[in-house]
Image: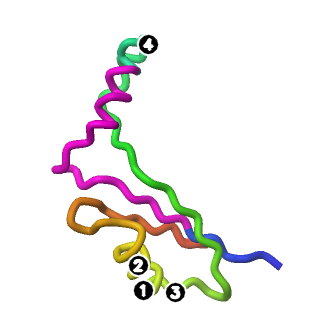
Amino acid sequence: MRVPRVVVDVVLKPEISDPQGQAVLGALGRLGHGSVRSVRQGKHFVLEVDGTPDRDELQQIAETLLANPVIEDVELHLPGA
């Protein structure tokens, strides 16, 4: 029996500075990968859930536990969506 997997990606909002992304971008340039114009780092969570995933419940979990909604954006990837 397959357990539904939900992916939650959390990244800093565009207006928030991303020093880690800037460091990676600088390293890419030094390594000769000058075609990369921007890097934003984030967090990636994979949740296995019982039954049919409830989007509202998962959104609440993401915004209250997995992310800081003041500075981070959340994107849910539900199975079959």
Q: In the current view of this chain or complex, which residue is farthest to the front?
A: 65
| Figure quadrant of residue 13 | bottom left
State if disc 2 and disc 1 touch (CB < 8 Å): yes
Left or right for 40, reference 61: left
Work out how far the residue at label 1 is from the one at label 2, CA to CA, in angstroms.
Answer: 5 Å
Q: Amino acid at mark 2?
A: Gln
Residue 15 position within the rendered picture, expressed as x and y whole percent measured from the top left: 16, 50
Q: Amino acid at mark 1?
A: Asp
Q: Earlier in the sequence, mark 2 or mark 3?
A: 3
Residue assigned mark 2: 59
Residue 41 position within the rendered picture, expressed as x and y whole percent measured from the top left: 38, 44
Q: Residue at x 50, y 56 (%)?
A: 44
Q: Identify whether 46 is placed above or below 53.
A: above
Q: Amino acid at mark 4?
A: Leu
Work out how far the residue at label 1 is from the one at label 4, CA to CA, in angstroms.
Answer: 43 Å
State if disc 3 and disc 2 touch (CB < 8 Å): no
Work out how far the residue at label 2 is from the one at label 3, CA to CA, in angstroms.
Answer: 9 Å
The answer to whether residue 25 is magenta is: yes
The disc placed on residue 54 is 3
Q: Residue at x 66, y 88 (%)?
A: 51
Q: Which residues are magenta?
A: 7-27
Q: Quick one: 4 or 46, which is closer to the camera?
A: 46
State if disc 1 and disc 3 touch (CB < 8 Å): yes
What colour-coding does the image apply? rainbow
Residue assigned mark 1: 56
Left or right for 61, reference 6: left
**On the rendered image, what quadrant is the C terminus found in?**
bottom right
Q: Crowdedness of circle 1 by 10 Å Cα count: few (<14), some, many (20+)?
A: few
Q: Earlier in the sequence, mark 4 or mark 2?
A: 4
Work out how far the residue at label 4 is from the one at label 2, CA to CA, in angstroms.
Answer: 38 Å
Work out how far the residue at label 3 is from the one at label 1, CA to CA, in angstroms.
Answer: 6 Å
The disc placed on residue 31 is 4
